[in-house]
Amino acid sequence: MKFDKICKYCISEIRKNSIGVAVVIFAVTTFLILFLIIKPYFFPHFLETKFETEEERGRYVLERLIR
Amino acid sequence: MEHVDFSLVDWSRLQFAVTAMYHWIFVSLTLGLAVIVAVMHTLYVRTNNEEWKNLTKFWMILFGVNLALGVASGIILEFQFGTNWSNYSWFVGDVFGAPLAIEGFMAFFLKAAFFAVMFFGWNRVSKGFHLLSTWLVAGSACISALWILIANAWMQYPVGMQFNPDLARNEMIDFWAVILSPVAITKFFHSVSAGFVTGGVVVVGISSWYLLKNRHKELARKSILVGASVGLFGLAVVMISGHFSAVHVGQKQPMKLAAIEGLFEGQEGAPFSVVAFSRSTNNPERPYELEMRGLKIPNLLSFMATNSFTGFVPGIVDLIEGNKERGIMSAYERARRGRVAQTALRELREARDTDPEEHARLRALFNDEVWLSEYFAHFGYGFFYDENPDVFRQNIARLVPNVPLNYWSFRIMIGLGFLFIFVLGLFGWWAYKDKLDGNKKLFYRLALICIPLVYISTQAGWVVAEVGRQPWVVQDLMPTFAGVTSEMSVGAVQTTLLVFAVLLSALFVAALKIMFAQIKKGPKEG
């Protein structure tokens, strides 16, 4: 209930200020682009997607260090 | 090194550098504005003067936009670790991951929790709690920087870890050695105080614009008073921490110091080069060597690096070819020892599934303090070793960072620092004496010009810190080219760089539009 009130208050304060609205829209859009598009499509975690265990990942990197 | 695709390495480095430098634009201003806003808020609470409240609200919006962009660009940096730098990310293990995780949980959540109270708490929470929230946001911005700089300092001076040869990764064995590393401490004070200088210069510059436009004169004077004070305090800390930083670089990264100074032959009572012109000596034995001619201040470099005007500062030639008299091992010998450590790692890998006794013997080497200091301490140099003497010499030349770039970046950083002392000192004094009148338009323009200059200065500082340590991504242990994900294609890195360039440019334009709108609107009067 209290959390509800805090959210409603923040939204009403943001609405009072056009630059505040712009800042919030800007921040939310940025994070959506980052986590919904950039991360999954352009930046998969190489070792985590290619290997299942820590040992496999270690073995892979080790091979790169000693070749 | 024949396996290395340097095109991939260079594109990956460029991508990281672009994102990191972009990130640093916003971080430096966020650090400074956070403290300036907190000081203004404190003055409002102490004096009950509504003008301080209006100023706090005004600068808070600029702080909010910067913070959002700083966080967003920081996230992009973290994406790159797992994709482009997977060998590096694995090799540094939890030593690098732990400070970043702590930063995420502690500082980020602290910031998020009190950010809303700071922005929307006016007349809703008590004045004391509201002020506390503002200071906690400012403090958490500094704490964020602290953990990131601890991680960065470990790359420049790796301590408190043990290498696990079975997993090919470093494991933290002494948390306190990592977080209390002298390099981390000086880096923290130097970088955060550089942020205070950025904040101070930007606030003074924007306020000068109001004075030029004959608007918000009293609010501009008040802003200049706070901005100049915070900026001058930052400059004092920058200079002190900068000296300690030079001493640490001289001890832990002597090649970086020699490159920054363009010092090729080491000497006692080494002079500081103010300006110099360089040309190649065309010496085939030393393809890295340059002749530096210019203005020098006697003995100053020795004092900067050793705290003694007669102290010995090694040059690039000493570090590459060795100097027995000074106990400096040559890079060639370090490469041979590094190769011994790499061979032991290869043999351990081969013995793991076939020869348990040999595996145990080799495993014990990686726990032997003497062997670690004599061989593993040079592990990264092993990548530069080659049986062919000509190739070996060419490889060793890669251990010298870009001298002209580091040399000039350092001088730009320091030279602009002196300009900021002058500008902030002058404006602070005029604001204090209430002498910011209409006859100082030339100076107001100078303050405005200082806004881009302060970014050039902080970016030059980043270049000195990060380009100066090349070719290392982890000092002496992992060269940058060994840290990249070798399976990545150059095309993929170019594509993501292009995506970033478009996204970051769009974000930058959007942020500038919001900030310019806020500046044009100005603080509320009365």
Image: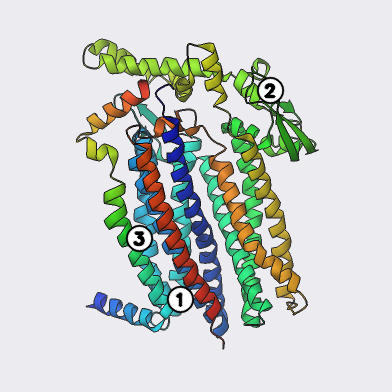
For mark 3, does the 10 Å Cα neighbourhood hold few (<14), some (14 to 19), or many (20 or more) residues?
Answer: few
- Does residue B410 appear to the left or right of B130 in the view shown? right
Q: Under tag 2, what secondary structure?
A: loop
- Which residue matches tag 2? B282
Residue at image location 66% in from the left, 39% down from the top = B407
Residue at image location 43% in from the left, 62% down from the top = B507
What residue occupies the far bottom of the structure in this picture? B526
Calculate the distance from the C-alpha at mark 1 to the C-alpha at mark 2.
Answer: 67 Å
Say which of B267 and B517 sits in front: B517
- Which residue matches tag 3? B109
Residue B67, horizontal then vertical, whole percent: 44, 63
For mark 1, does the 10 Å Cα neighbourhood hold few (<14), some (14 to 19), or many (20 or more) residues?
Answer: few
- Does residue B142 appear to the left or right of B80 in the view shown? right
Which one is in front in this view, the residue at disc 3 or the one at disc 1?
3
Q: Under tag 1, what secondary structure?
A: helix
- Counting residues from the start of the chain, the first of labels 1 and 2 encountered is 1
Tell me which corner region of the image, top left, top right, bottom left or bottom right, holds residue B166: top left
- Counting residues from the start of the chain, the first of labels 3 and 1 encountered is 3
Chain identifier of the residue bearing label 3 in the image = B
**Disc assigned to residue B201:** none
